Amino acid sequence: MGNITVAILGALDYGSTLAKKGTATDITLYNLKKGEDTVTFIEPTRYPERLAPLFYACALAKEAIIIVDELNATFGEQLVMLQCSDIKTGYIVLRNYIPKEKIQPIIKGTSLENFEFVADDANQLREKLLADAAKQKPAPSAQTIGTVPVDHAFNVKGVGVVVLGIVAYGTIQKHAALNVLPAAKTAQVRSIQKHDDEFDVAGEDDRVGLALKNIEVEDLDRGTILTNDPSIKTITKLQVQASLVKYWQTPIKAGMVVHIGHWTQFITAKVEATTEAGDPKKPTLSITLDKPLVYRPNDKAVLMYLDGAKLRVAGTVGLP
């Protein structure tokens, strides 16, 4: 079974032309299945008035579809978020007679320059994405550790506590005991569903519904991390080097309130101090987080500043 998760940016409800609508909150998910291959689409429903849904859609995805109606600040912010989220493959759909020659110089030299320009044809896109999913069939793995960032959690009558998420890496097995972070609790996997089918194991990039026991739904929300990886860290203060995008004009200064995004965590933070060592685009930041950040060493997080005028995505920070 191959699966990919795809962010759809630029046109609300475009996913309804491609797949069956699923969970809908500030992000909307759509599910497509053909044989053993599946595609999960995510739209940032409450974007652009809120930046968080755009972050969640890109953080959860490995590919993207960008629908371009006009070249404006919103389009530019979406491109920057995709770049900071390391999304390197996807499709660009042009509308309103916008020629690709206007887009190509903008994305040249970025992770988006290999995106394929395609017609605004849902059937064609659907087949391309199913073919992409088919290429993702994972090799058998003996790995028994894995991590699932939670994006939704709720009670299901007759089942109990259920969380939805995408396996960030590794494998998750039925009956596995998982740490619930940052709450420092433990839950056991009662059952695993992938696109409404039952499985004993889920692997990297799989969209899963996990029924859990020994935990209450009140202990789970978006940003909760389920893991049995002993290398996972939890931290409330960061001393990190930032890599600001070339379009970012606002200096990062002490006292600024920023947001750090990693997996499904979107955490408010305060910049305590900044140090520049010659390159203004690579300052060292001392940051205090409003709540603990859960991460794997050497991961990267997105740095955002919600009071930015036309651009709210500042860049990235490396995590220790």
Image (cartoon, rainbow, N blue to C red):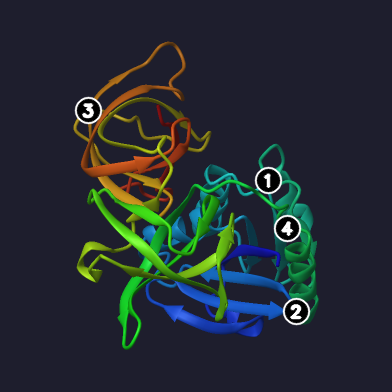
What is the quadrant of the C terminus in the image? Answer: top left
Whole-percent x and y of residue 68?
A: 64, 65
In this rendering, position of residue 90 left or right of residue 278:
right
Q: Which amino acid does label 2 sit on?
A: Gly
Identify the mark nearer the N-term, 1 or 3: 1
* Label 1–label 2 contact, CB within 8 A: no
Mark 1 vs mark 4: in front: 4
Residue drawn at x 73%, y 64% is: 133
Label 3: few (<14), some (14–19) or many (≥20) C-alpha neighbours in 10 Å? some
Q: Which amino acid does label 4 sit on?
A: Gln
Identify the secondary structure beneath mark 1: helix
The quadrant in which residue 217 appears is bottom left
Residue situated furthest bottom in the rendering = 157
Q: Circle 4 sits on which residue?
A: 136
Give the CA separation, mark 3 to mark 4: 44 Å
Mark 1 vs mark 2: in front: 2
Give the CA separation, mark 1 to mark 4: 26 Å
Q: What residue type is labelled 1?
A: Ile
Identify the secondary structure beneath mark 3: loop
Residue drawn at x 65%, y 70% is: 39
Q: What residue type is labelled 3?
A: Ala
Give the CA separation, mark 3 to mark 2: 53 Å
What is the quadrant of the N terminus in the image? Answer: bottom right
Q: Circle 1 sits on which residue?
A: 107
Which label is found at residue 254?
Answer: 3
Identify the mark nearer the N-term, 1 or 4: 1
Identify the mark nearer the N-term, 3 or 2: 2
Q: Circle 2 sits on which residue?
A: 35
Label 2: few (<14), some (14–19) or many (≥20) C-alpha neighbours in 10 Å? few
Identify the secondary structure beneath mark 4: loop
Whole-percent x and y of residue 151?
A: 39, 64
